[in-house]
Image (tube, helix red, strand yellow):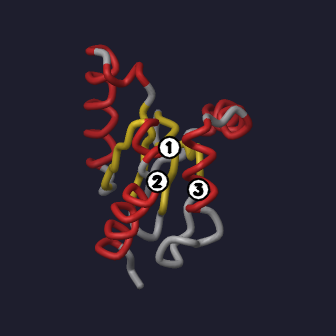
Amino acid sequence: MLKYNRALKQNARRLRKETTDSERALWSRLRRKQVHNVPFYRQKPIGDYIVDFYAPQARLVVEIDGSQHMEEKGIQKDKQRDAYLKSQGLDVLRFDNLQVLRKLDAVLETIFRATVERSDG
């Protein structure tokens, strides 16, 4: 069972209110089981992290990365985060903001394929 960090609950709520354009665009296509009838949650605390999107049925995390993730410090933090999430049995898909905004259908196809491969039903 995944560790839920209650200390991150308030921050997760704040992040849900302060979504980026790319998060808003992707959420409009993930919500209400639009992808392979799999429910997604946004800004979900898992361990010491808050992930952008989480599909428990598929054990899938989807992250949308801004420019700070392209810098060395961000890359190292993402490696640690991904290693933790993978140790919990989760797959992590990463897309940058421009991919989501300019190639949303391709991003959704990748997410769809991952949910098909990893879903229980």
How crowded pointer 3 is (Cα within 10 Å; few <14, some 14-19, many 20+) is rated as some
Q: Secondary structure at mark 1?
A: helix
Q: Kindly report the distance in space between the C-alpha atoms of the residues bearing marks 3 and 1.
A: 20 Å
Please tell me the numbered disc located at residue 104: 2
Label 3 sits on what residue type? Tyr
Q: Kindly report the distance in space between the C-alpha atoms of the residues bearing marks 3 and 2.
A: 18 Å
Q: Secondary structure at mark 3?
A: strand
Q: Kindly report the distance in space between the C-alpha atoms of the residues bearing marks 1 and 2.
A: 6 Å
Precedes in sequence: disc 3 or disc 2: 3
Where in the figure is residue 52, as x and y percent of width and height? 52, 43
Q: Secondary structure at mark 2?
A: helix
Which residue occupies 26% across, 22% down?
76
How crowded pointer 1 is (Cα within 10 Å; few <14, some 14-19, many 20+) is rated as some
Image check: 95 left or right of 4? left
**Residue under circle 1?**
101
Are discs 1 and 2 less than 8 Å apart at CB? Answer: yes
Choose mark 3 or mark 2, whichever is in front: 2
Please tell me the numbered disc located at residue 41: 3
Label 1 sits on what residue type? Leu
| Residue 112 sits above or below residue 105 on the image | below
| Residue 80 sits above or below residue 39 on the image | above
Which residue occupies 47% across, 63% down?
56
| Residue 32 sits above or below residue 86 on the image | below
Which residue occupies 47% across, 77% down?
36
Label 2 sits on what residue type? Leu
Q: Nearer the viewer, residue 71 or 100?
A: 100
Q: Residue furthest bottom?
A: 121
